[in-house]
Amino acid sequence: MAEKTKLIIGIILFNMVICYANAQTDSLATKIDSLEKVYNLEGVIVTAHKRIFTQKPDRLIFNVENSIVSNGGNALAALKITPGIKVQNEQITMIGKNEMTVMVDERPVKLSGESLINFLRGISSTTIKSIEVISTPPAKYKAQGNSGLVNIILKKAKVGTWSLILRNTYQQATYGDNKSGADFNLRKKKLSISSNISTASGKDRYAMDQFTYYPVETWHLSAPLKRSYNFMNVNFGVDYDASRTLTIGMNYLGHKTNNPFRQYKFNTEIMDANNNMSSYMETFNDKIHKGYTHVLNVHGIVRLDSLGKKIKIDLDYLRNTNKDSTSDYGASYFPDREQIAGSYYANISRNKSEVSNYAAKVDVELPLWWINFNFGGQLDFTTNSNDYTFYDNLSVSQIVDNSQSNYFKYKENIAALYLSASKSLSKRLSMQFGIRVEQSYTEGRSLTIDQANKHHYLNAFPSAYVLYKLSDIKSLSLSYSRRINRPYFYDMNPFKTYTSQYDYSVGNTSLKPSYSDNLDLMLSSGIFVHKVWYSHVSDDYAIYPTIDPTTKIIKRSPSNFINYYSVGMSESYTFNKWWWWNSYNNVTFYYINKRAILSEAPPMIDRISGNFMTQNDFLLNKKKTWILNFGFYYELPYISSYSKVASNYYFYMGVRTNLLENRLSLSLNVNDIFKTYRMCETMTSNDVRYKYDNRFDTRYLQFSVSYKIGNSSIRGRRHATANENIRRRIK
């Protein structure tokens, strides 16, 4: 342990030395890359590149409009090369954070998973001005989650412009899927309208092998998954400038998911101590899922003067409904395929869940000559209900099993106040401090058994930021924030979900929130970003399997059993010295130490880990209308929840072109070229070792086309909402 500590300290000190060296020396190349001027010297024109990275006290800004990705790409492609952001097989995360919230012009995008990915694909990079990376969110944002924020800033549209973008993407893996959409934007003198619709349909699959090593036997479970899906997103927004001092508007987001089937087939081979099969099981799991989400926001901005004083008001409503129907059946057999007497089972379960949220917030901005004040408040009222019915299907007619059925209702009310202040003490030094106070009340009640769990807690969440400009192009920042991570609604629901008769998951009504303290040190220049971070999390929760040694039934339930800290560093470098080659590179190293307060789990696991990413764009012509890209991602072994995950890597490449005066965009991409990406993890519980090998269908060929109509490429105005994180906590 002492050697590892010394190694980590050495890594951090080495990185700080590098940062200091860079801070003391302004290279000519960096200076050139950061200038925005054109010099005319006796007929010779010298054009310098614009800055790619800039820094504010609480965020790093990636100037997308100054990079090659602005030419014919999309928001997802821009995020791939944003420092601190990891897009891994279309999963978006922030390095060093458990979660991440995506915003567009300060308005949180209330989508997740594939819906979020498709939404980002629909934002043309030509409309993006910059991307803000906020690793330690300030007091004005909710304290929920050990997460960061990514804010996509769109270019302002000119008055009297409109645009219509039609887009389609076809993707072929084992199965094919198709995604289509349209975006319409209009900007009049006082009126702005933005709307989009997107649809997707197709099938996908993945395979899993699970090994359970008991002292005297081994269970090997293999499970291919097949899933069909289709969904639709509808988004509409309008803003109206009623006067010079008043702007009002509304936004609506609708999401519909329909997965006609999700089919598992589990084959479990039971091997004795001599590795001979003693018996095996066949288990089938079929699931049908339908879901709807409606989000409505009404907002207003009152400008108190021309110096920036303003009041922002948001009223929000969210409703999410999911319906699931699951059928489980199976039996056990001897090696000669003779069914074991009494082993057959069958059941059906149906669950209807609803989440509703009402929220309101007020933000006041008061820039004064001597200091800038921001303060405000927020109210959140959330209700989550789950009606779970379990049917014993062994009989001819379905019989409700009341012992396993349950109706669960969860209420969460949060009241918050915040205050922040910022001040530029000199041309080089600026500071920002904030405090957010949240009063939370939660109640989880099982109406079936008349059992309730209530919690009241008052928390203060401070934040602080210091920025020092070492030169015109280099800035050094130090930031701190405290956060809270409330559980997913699903994880608190006490009903059981069976994978087989020997494996089930169940929620925990006694789950508590976890807390994190985060410290970041960052040095940025025109093409370099150096970062060192430290994070400490207490009472973190995760799902850890426990096993009954007699029945061999595995229970998977979340609990607060982890305390951990992580310390690490990352280096981002953008190379664009030649007109035909742009290279974006990031390397990260970190150490994580987790300690468990759970008798079934090892008392401690720790690991040094890291990852490397490179993406290279090659311009095939000087008009920059043909671009070839190639990328590589590699991740060292790491810790997820409380299990150890093996290393993985993959390659990807593609080509895109812009035709017809950039109105027509075509792209062809290949992901995971050599089909190398997989997830292999191990864990130990009650002296029983588990090994999981998940193989995803990540190698695919993708063709995309989009066509723009109109007199300008614009986006409607976006607005921040009050219930920004409720959608994220819905599974």
Image: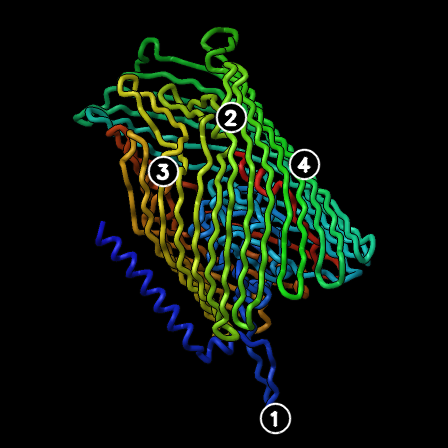
Please give the label number shown on residue 42.
1
Type of residue at label 3?
A: Ile
Rendered residue at 48%/70% (across/down): 525
Instruction: Name which quarter of the figure residue 153 lies in.
Output: bottom right
Q: In front: mark 1 or mark 4?
A: 4
Q: Position of residue 472 (x, y in %)?
A: 52, 75
Quote the CA–CA distance across marks 4 and 2. Answer: 25 Å
The amino acid at mark 1 is: Glu
Q: Is 532 drawn above or below residue 323 in the view shown?
A: below
Task: Decide if residue 492 is on the left or right side of residue 722.
Answer: left
In the picture of the structure, the residue carrying the numbered disc 4 is: 317
Crowdedness near tag 3: few (<14), some (14–19) or many (≥20) residues, C-alpha within 10 Å: many
Helix, strand, or loop for circle 4?
strand
State the SS at label 1: loop
Residue at image location 46% in from the left, 53% down from the top: 86
Asked whether disc 4 touches disc 2, contact meaning CB atoms under 8 Å apart, the reply is: no
**Picture disc at residue 562:** 3
Disc 3/disc 4 C-alpha distance (Å):
34 Å
Asked if one can make out residue 78 in the rendered structure from this viewpoint, the answer is: no
| Residue 432 sits above or below residue 287 on the image | below
The vertical placement of 475 against 6, above or below, is below
The mark total stands at 4
Q: Give the class, few, some or many, for how many residues have Cα within 10 Å of label 1's Cα (few <14, many ≥20).
A: few
Q: Residue at x 57, y 55 (%)?
A: 75
Task: Kindly identify which numbered label has been placed on residue 454.
Answer: 2
Residue in front for this viewpoint, 432 or 319: 432
